Structures are given as structure tokens and as C-alpha cells.
Amino acid sequence: MGEDELNLYEYYEKLSYFDLVISEIRALRVRIERCLEEGFSLSMEEINEKLEDVVDKIEEYGDLYGYDDFYEKMNESLEELFWTSLEEESRIFSCGNVEKRNVWRKVLDSFGLIRFWNRWECEKQGNEIRVYILHEETGFYLLHATYKLLEEPFCHVCSMPGVITSDCTYHLDLYGFDRIYVLGKYIASSRRTGDDSLSDHILKLKVEKEYALPLGKGLAMTLCYSYHELLNSDFIVPVPLHSNQYRERRYNQALELGRVVSEYLKREKGVNIPVVYSLRKTKNVKMHNLSRVERKKIVKGLYEIIENKSYLFEGKKVILIDDVVTTGFTVSECSRVLKEAGAREVNVLALARTV
């Protein structure tokens, strides 16, 4: 049943059920926090039982009402409940009781919400981003990976590597956006000849949400150092997944990257560019096995603005964010929709350009 088909009573019932689930999650968090403060008196069996109850209610809600953006709304609410402050993070990681830390991590894991901001750190060194991970037992950061940044020559319209802008033909049939900005190159595993941490982490992001932290921080750092003209943007808009894809994966990697980039800019630069989830994918189409010609045809009409959000973009400068740009037709169509909604400028920001 679509949301527009619900009568007022059904809509009220839907919101009431949603509030009930959120209330139970909040109560669970309060109980666990109290146990952590008092010395861990809550058994893992009790925690698992409570978590299963909440997850069952989430599934029941989704099955009962089945509207497209339910999982996105639920995820946003859970993020607000479980996003820990820097002070909380420091307290949890500095406490000597490993069991307490593992309990808190298990709670976050149960919802796929590992958002410990300080677990990953990045720094720019020359033409690379060095990624460090916190070793919890020692409290030291260890070098984990290195992302190689895009180097000249590359096209300053579509970021295709190995070609200058005036000679580039890859973007001639693309449309909608003003420019594509990327951190580096994505190379499929079957074609790699050496270590490629950026491509490895992009693949891991498809199945492990936590990789949005190092990748998002690296992308935000690249924006600040190399693409500072984007700092005066108004919104970050993630490329959407279809609701069926979202239910399978339980998160949207573009949305997670957008949240990390937005948070980094706020914390490190004092720049507020909020994430606005405003696009919807209308059909459950997977394009990884399609040719360039097939992709160009199938994206037509595949994306639309979510109801009541088009007014946001009149005269605004938008960052459209995604993990990888392959042919460029997905970001073209999303950009076209945003421009039709009134956006003055749409720039694409992605981790990598496929080569």
C-alpha cells in the first residue's frame, strides 16, 4: 500500500507504531547505559532477547505498511539514538573492562550502526590519504591502508583519468551535472596488478557499513584540500537505492558516505552542509552487468524527487554523492531530476572513477 493511499486513520496508526518501536529502542539504550555505569549486570541473553524483540517489531512494521522510505526513516532514527558523542566514545574506549566495550559494540552491531568516529583516522601525505585504525587494547593508531589520489592528467568535467579535458570524449553523452569530482580510481579486482586499498575498501563498503568512516573521511579531506569550491554548497544528496535493495543491504552506502562527509566538514571546518535524502529510485534495476548503451537507456525516468522535497532546491548548489562513477549515466539522471527541481548547480562527488 502506498503512502498516498492511506487514509488519515491508517496514517496515524502507522506513526503511532513507529513511535512505539523507537520508544522501545530508546528504553533499551537507557537500560544498557545504566548497566555499563553500574558495572555490567545485564546478561548477554537478556540483551539479545531485547534486541530480537525490537528487530521483530521493525520487520513487522515494514511488512505491515511497506512504504518505500520506511527503512530509511528507521535508520535515521536509530542513528540519532546510537550516535555517540566524542566524550562518550572516549569514556567507552578508555575503560579497562573489555567486556563492557564489547557489549556496547554488540548493541551497535545488532543494528549495523558502528559509528565510532574516532576508530578511524585519516591524514593527507603528498598525493595519498593514509588511513589509520585504532588498536583498542593499546589505544594507538596503526596504519591500515593508503588511498592514492587522482593525478593529472584527468578530465576536469567527468574525472576520467589519463586524458586532458579538451580531448575527453567520455562525457559527451552525459548530462545534468556541472562537474564530477572523485578521490581516486576504482579498478576491478580481476584487473589489478598490485595493492589498491581504495578499490578494496569500496568493495568492502558494499557489505560492511563501517568502511563508510575511513572512505568518507578521506573523501571529505580530499574535498577540503583539492575541491574547496564545493565548500559553499547547500546540500549533500545521496544517490538512492531501491527500497528492495535497501531491505537486503539494510543501508545505503551513498547515504552513509554523505553523513560522514557532512559530519567531517562540520567538526573539522565548521562548515554545515546537511544531508538531504530527497531522491527515490522507482524500479529495482541492477546495472552492473549492463553495457554502456543499455545503462544509458535504462536510467531514463529511473529517479524522481520524493514528494514535498522539490521546494528545497530552488536556486541551491547541490553535491550529489555516490561511491563509484562507472559510465556516469546514473549521476546524470539524478542530476537532471535535481536541476528540474530548481537546483542552480549540481556537482557529483564520488570515491572513484572506474577505469
Image: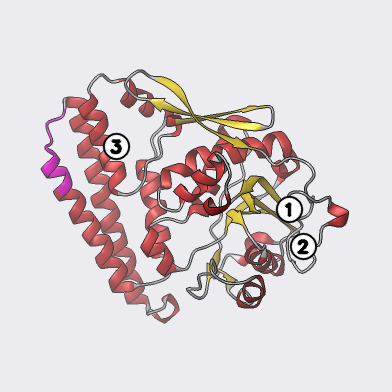
Given the image, on which type of amino acid does mark 1 rest?
Met
Label 3, secondary structure: give it: helix
Q: Nearer the viewer, residue 60 or 135?
A: 135
Residue, x 27% and y 47% (percent of image)? 110
**Type of residue at label 2?**
His
Quarter of the N terminus within the rendering: bottom left
Residue 215 lies left or right of residue 9; in this view the side is right
Magenta stretch? 40-48
The residue identified by callout 1 is 160
Which callout, 3 or 1, points at the residue further toward the start of the chain?
A: 3
Answer above or below: position of 340 versus 206: below
Residue lying at 41% horizontally and 81% vertically, measured from the top left: 5
Mark 1 crowdedness (10 Å alpha carbons): few <14, some 14-19, many ≥20 = many
Horizontal and vertical percent position of residue 309? 58, 65
Q: Relative to residue 256, is residue 268 drawn left or right?
A: right
Which amino acid is tagged 3?
A: Arg
Asked if the residues shown at circle 1 and circle 2 are in contact, with their CB atoms under 8 angstroms apart, the answer is yes
In terms of depth relative to the viewer, which is nearer, 324 or 322?
Answer: 324
Residue at the spot 60% in from the left edge and 41% down from the top edge: 219
- Decide if residue 265 is in sight here: no
Report the front residue among 310 and 210.
Answer: 210
